[in-house]
């Protein structure tokens, strides 16, 4: 069931890529399951909505490190949901 819920979230995000609230709800759902992808989703939303600053540069570096430790297909899905390939 958990896998089906994850897929349902991913489909909803692809259908509504501009809905950052949906992505944050997905992050909450992941966090409730102790899934490390939650932090990745939150950072991606933050980076997408924040202007360039020293803090944003630091967050981007951490974001890239974290992405290297997660499933590459899932990371590609999240990047696609923000219009980045």
Image (cartoon, rainbow, N blue to C red):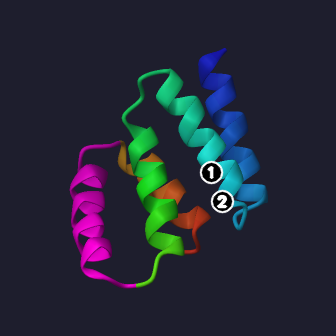
The percent coordinates of residue 43 (x first, y second) are 41, 57
The percent coordinates of residue 2 (x first, y second) are 61, 19
Nearer to us in this view, 82 or 85: 82
Q: Quadrant of residue 62?
A: bottom left
Secondary structure of the residue carrying numbered label 1: helix
Nearer to us in this view, 26 or 51: 51
Q: Residue at x 68, y 27 (%)?
A: 5
Secondary structure of the residue carrying numbered label 2: helix
Query: From mark 1 to mark 2, how far is it between C-alphas?
Result: 5 Å
Query: Can residue 77 be seen by looking at this rendering?
Result: yes
Q: Quadrant of residue 82?
A: bottom right
Check disc 2 and report the residue beneath it. 20
Query: Can residue 84 be seen by looking at this rendering?
Result: no
For the stretch drawn in magenta, the main secondary structure is helix
Q: Residue at x 30, y 59 (%)?
A: 63
Q: Quadrant of the N terminus?
A: top right
Q: Magenta span covers which residues? A: 52-70
Numbered label attached to residue 23: 1
Do the residues bearing badges 1 and 2 touch, measured as CB atoms within 8 Å? yes
In the figure, is residue 68 to the left or right of 48?
Answer: left
Residue furthest to the top in view is 1
The percent coordinates of residue 16 (x first, y second) are 77, 60
């Amino acid at each position: 069931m958990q896998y089906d819920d994850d897929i349902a979230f991913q489909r909803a995000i692809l259908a509504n890529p501009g809905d950052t609230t949906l992505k944050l709800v997905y992050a909450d759902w992941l966090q409730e399951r102790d899934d490390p992808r939650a932090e990745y989703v939150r950072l991606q939303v933050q980076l997408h909505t924040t202007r360039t600053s020293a803090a944003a540069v630091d967050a981007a570096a951490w974001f890239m490190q974290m992405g290297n430790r997660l499933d590459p297909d899932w990371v590609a899905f999240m990047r696609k949901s923000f219009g980045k390939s």
